[in-house]
Image (cartoon, grey):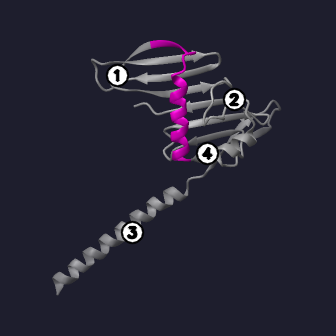
Amino acid sequence: MMKLNSYLLIGLLTLFISCKEREKVQMKVTEKKPMTELKGKTNKIGEQKKVTVQYIENDSLLAKLISDLNRIALNQKFTSQKTPIKNRHVDDLTDTIITLTYDNTILELYKAESEKWIFNAKIKNAEFKLLDSINVYKSKSRIENIIGSELKSDSVKIGNLEQTSVFIFKFENGKLKVIEYQGYVD
C-alpha cells in the first residue's frame, strides 16, 4: 500500500510540474505584441513624437518575399564585388561576401563553400518588384491589398516568429520609400 501511494504521489508531482511548464510556455507566446513603440526626438526641445513599428508574422508571405529577393539577385544589371572573409567555424576555410549594387539598390550575399544566401538588402529602385507588384513608390493602400493586411504604421516589418528574417517596408507620405531585408547569418 505504501508503494502504491509513493507511485501515485510521484505521478501527481510529475503531472503538476509538466502542467506548470506548459503554462509558462503559453504565457511567453501570448505576451508577444504586434506593435512596438519607439520614441524619437523632434526638432522642438523637450517634445517627442511616437514612431511605431508594426510587425506582421507570416511565414508563407516571408518565404515568397525571400524567393523574389533571390530572383532579383540574379538580375544582370547588378555589378558585383567580392570580399573574402574568414569562416567563423572552420579556421582554414575562407567564405565570401558578395555585394551587388545597381543604382540605389544594394544586396549582400554570404557565400560559404556549398551555398550562398542573401543576408542584407536595401532596395530604393522602383524597377525591382516583390510579389510581382510591390516596389518603391507604390502607395500604402495598394500594398495593403497585395499582402492582405492593414498597415498601421510608416514602418512595417514582415518576418518569422524568431525575427531572424525580416523585410522592412518604410513609407513616407503614403508611398513606399525603401524596402530593406535583414537575414540571419551564422
Q: How crowded is mark 1: few (under 14 residues within 10 Å), some or many (20 or more)?
A: some
User: Is tag 1's residue or tag 3's residue first in the polypeptide sequence?
Assistant: 3
Q: Which of 27 and 157 is in front in this view?
A: 157
User: Is tag 1's residue or tag 2's residue first in the polypeptide sequence?
Assistant: 1
Amino acid type, residue under disc 1 in the picture: Asn
User: Which residue is rendered at x = 70% and y = 39% of the image?
Assistant: 39
User: Is tag 2's residue or tag 4's residue first in the polypeptide sequence?
Assistant: 4
User: Which residue is rendered at x = 25% and y = 74% of the image?
Assistant: 10
Q: Is residue 156 above or below residue 7?
A: above
Q: Are marks 1 and 4 in contact (CB under 8 Å)?
A: no
For the image, the number of numbered tags is 4
Q: Residue 136 carries which label?
A: 2
Q: Label 4 belongs to which residue?
A: 55
Q: How crowded is mark 3: few (under 14 residues within 10 Å), some or many (20 or more)?
A: few
User: Is tag 1's residue or tag 4's residue first in the polypeptide sequence?
Assistant: 4
Assign a secondary structure to mark 2: loop
User: Which image quadrant is residue 16 in?
Assistant: bottom left
User: Which residue is rendered at x = 61% and y = 40% of the image?
Assistant: 157
User: Is tag 2's residue or tag 3's residue first in the polypeptide sequence?
Assistant: 3
Q: Label 3 belongs to which residue?
A: 19
